[in-house]
Image (cartoon, grey):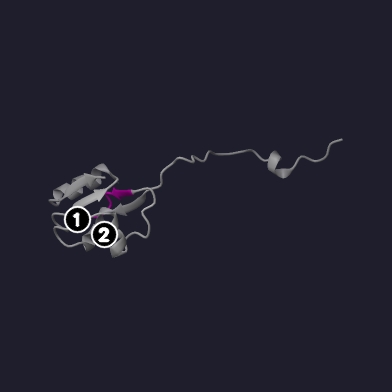
Amino acid sequence: EGGQMPLYRRLPKRGFKNVWAKTFAEVNVGSLNCFEDGTTVDPVALIEVGILKNVRDGIRILGDGELTAKNLTVRAQGFTHAAAEKIAAAGGKVEVI
């Protein structure tokens, strides 16, 4: 005969969860200073040093901080424009995996 509407049906449904969205592990340029000059920085090296614990769906390098290490070859899935400029200004190379 009826009854009270359950609470989960009375409340409005909000938002959207994209199940195909990729989550990237983010690393700032300033944290790459722990590497020696002329080394190759890749996901394995970042985990060995302790900057990252897991890679998730990939690594994205952000442009926060200053890079003092010279001639680094940085390999990652994505770079911001500022990060790529800072790496190139320090004499390094950017490689998109």
- For the residue marked with disc 2, what is the amino acid? Ala
Give, as a single range, the part of the protein colored magenta. 59-66
Left or right, 26 with reference to 71: right
Please say if 54 is above or below 77.
below
Q: Position of residue 33 (x, y in %)?
A: 22, 60
- For the residue marked with disc 1, what is the amino acid? Thr
Q: Position of residue 13 (x, y in %)?
A: 61, 38
Q: Which residue is at the front of the view, 90 or 20?
A: 20
Element type at mark 2: helix
Marks 1/2: CA–CA distance: 8 Å
Please say if 30 is above or below 6.
below
Left or right, 71 with reference to 61: left
Q: Residue at x 19, y 49 (%)?
A: 86
Q: Position of residue 18 (x, y in %)?
A: 49, 39
Left or right, 17 with reference to 34: right
Q: Which residue is at the front of the view, 90 or 97?
A: 97
Q: Residue at x 38, y 57 (%)?
A: 54
The residue labelled by disc 1 is 40
The residue labelled by disc 2 is 45
Q: Are marks 1 and 2 in contact (CB under 8 Å)?
A: yes
Q: Around disc 1, counting alpha carbons within 10 Å, would you say few (fewer than 14), some (14 to 19), or many (20 or more)?
A: some
Which quadrant: the N terminus? top right
Element type at mark 1: strand
